[in-house]
Every structure is written in structure tokens, then in C-alpha cells.
Image: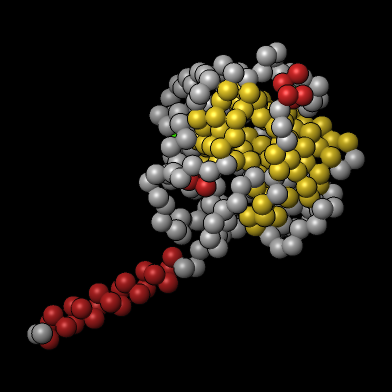
Amino acid sequence: MTKAAYLLLLLTLVFNCKNESKTAETDTNKETTQPTQKIATSKTEKQLRHVYKAKDTIVIDAVANDSAWAKSSWYAIDQVWLGDSLSKEDYSGRFKLSWSDEALYVLAEIKDDTLIDTIEDPLERWWDDDCLEIFVDEDNSGGEHQYNHNAFAYHIALDGNVADMSTEKIGKLYNSHVESKNRTIGNTTIWEVKMALYDDSYNDKGTNTPVALSADKKIGFAIAYCDNDKSLEREHFIGSIPVEGEDKNRGWIDANIFGTLLLKD
Ligand SMILES: [Ca+2]
Ligand SMILES: [Ca+2]
Ligand SMILES: [Ca+2]
Ligand SMILES: [Ca+2]
């Protein structure tokens, strides 16, 4: 090896080392970091759940007396994605699902000892106030969705604002996609949610039409709760599906971790 070639090799090695230490510094509690894991291009289907069509209109009023809810099963939101040991008094949660031609419906029952909505700006650290987070991948494709609309991660705040990351890599309100109401009695909050689904051609600057739903359609789906009681950053993040690996805060980047819904008549 010539002296020049040796020097070039040495420089390449030093440069690569520097790049690696940079990516290792990312903070996984923030939703503004780059992906730290490789994301598979195809989804392995898991947690396949049948969702039954509502025969009567579901009224979004945070009262669960609609006929569709009587016929739907409860599913747990009990997988700790962020935070240390979690007590039953601190948080517990479960949800039901239904659908109509124009929307997917979610009923969530969250028990949280302290409700907070302290950050006034809905586009500032929207994951650090108490909020319900619903992940939806309209065509169940899986794959990366950090700054694109291959899938959405709707953060629904207590005041009804709905935030997600836009293709501009900043927070954006998607209030027109999600109609919701919540009502709290004691430590229990009932959330009733109606969501229009949009496909991956969604354009943040254009006019978009929601997808019509029909029986036998598959949708990628997960739901989570961001629980903060008294801290600067959320204390726990609890989801509806187990996430493999060390970093479990993957839903806002990687639609492969979502479960799958199968719509039934
Ligand atoms: Ca209702
Ligand atoms: Ca709590
Ligand atoms: Ca998709
Ligand atoms: Ca809380």
C-alpha cells in the first residue's frame, strides 16, 4: 500500500467513527429524533382483531350508550413503552372499536390519577401533556412514516386538539380528521373518537378525500396513552401492543409495530 492510500484509509475510518457516535446520542423520549433502528419494508401481521360495523350512528358525546359499544369487546392498553414501574393507581386503560362507511370509531376508558394539560401551545411537545395517541395505517402497509403520511400518529389532547408530525418535519394540527369528546368522572376519563382515514397520498398542502371503508378491509392500528402527572416530560407511555427490542417508542416512526384490524359487517 502506498503512503497516500494508507492515509486515505485512515481518514475514512476516523470519519466513519465520528458519524456513528453522533447517531448514538439521540434521546428516545423526544419525538424529534432520527430513527435509530433499521425499518423493515414489509410488515409481519400481528394482533389481528375483528372490528364490527356499527348498525346505528355512534354519537360522539363521551357517553358509551351507543348500540355498537354494547357489541364490541374491550382490549387492554397495558404495554409500557416508556417509563419505569407503573402502578394501577397511576394509570390503567382499555378500548373498543367499531366502524362505518366513513369512519373508524374508538371508545377508550382511561384511569389516570392526575390529568394535566399544562403546555398551552398544542404544537409544542404535544406528547408531554396527558393525551390519547391513535396510530393508523390506512392500507396496513407497515413501513416508515416519520415525516410522511404512510401512516398517522394522532395525539388527541384533553382540549380536543389533534397533532402529528407533518411532511415539513414540524407539528401540525389535524383536527379535521378526528372528532372527539372526553368526559371525566373521578379518575376515569371516557374518550369517544370518530376518525376519517386518509391514504398515503395525503398532501399537507392540498385537498384530500378520506377513504371509504368496507368489510374485509385491513387497517394497521395501535393506541396508546401519554401519562404525565407532575413532570416536565411525560412519565409513562403505555400502548396496546408489545414492541420488540430495547426502544419501544417506535410507533411514531415505524408502522410495522402496529397491530392489524379486519373490518367485518
Ligand atoms: Ca356515544
Ligand atoms: Ca397518572
Ligand atoms: Ca400505509
Ligand atoms: Ca396524568
Measured as percent of width and height from the top left, residue 191 is found at 75, 32
Q: Is residue 6 above or below residue 107?
A: below
Picture mark count: 0
Q: Residue at x 73, y 35 (%)?
A: 74
Q: Quadrant of the N terminus?
A: bottom left
Measured as percent of width and height from the top left, residue 89 is found at 85, 52
Q: Is residue 48 above or below residue 179?
A: below
Q: Is residue 153 visible?
A: no
Q: Quadrant of the C terminus?
A: top right
Measured as percent of width and height from the top left, residue 126 is found at 64, 45
As drawn, the residue found furthest toward the top would be: 56
Q: Is residue 227 left or right of residue 220?
A: right
Q: Is residue 102 visible?
A: yes
Measured as percent of width and height from the top left, residue 60 is found at 73, 22
As drawn, the residue found furthest toward the left would be: 2
Q: Residue at x 24, y 78 (%)?
A: 11
Q: Is residue 245 left or right of residue 184?
A: left
The residue lying toward the viewer, choosing from 42 and 212, is 42
Q: Residue at x 77, y 24 (%)?
A: 70
Q: Is residue 214 left or right of residue 62?
A: left
Q: Residue at x 75, y 43 (%)?
A: 93
The residue lying toward the viewer, choosing from 62 and 64, is 64
The type of colouring in the image is secondary structure
Q: Is residue 7 above or below residue 92?
A: below
Q: Is residue 120 above or below residue 232?
A: above
The residue lying toward the viewer, choosing from 2 and 74, is 74
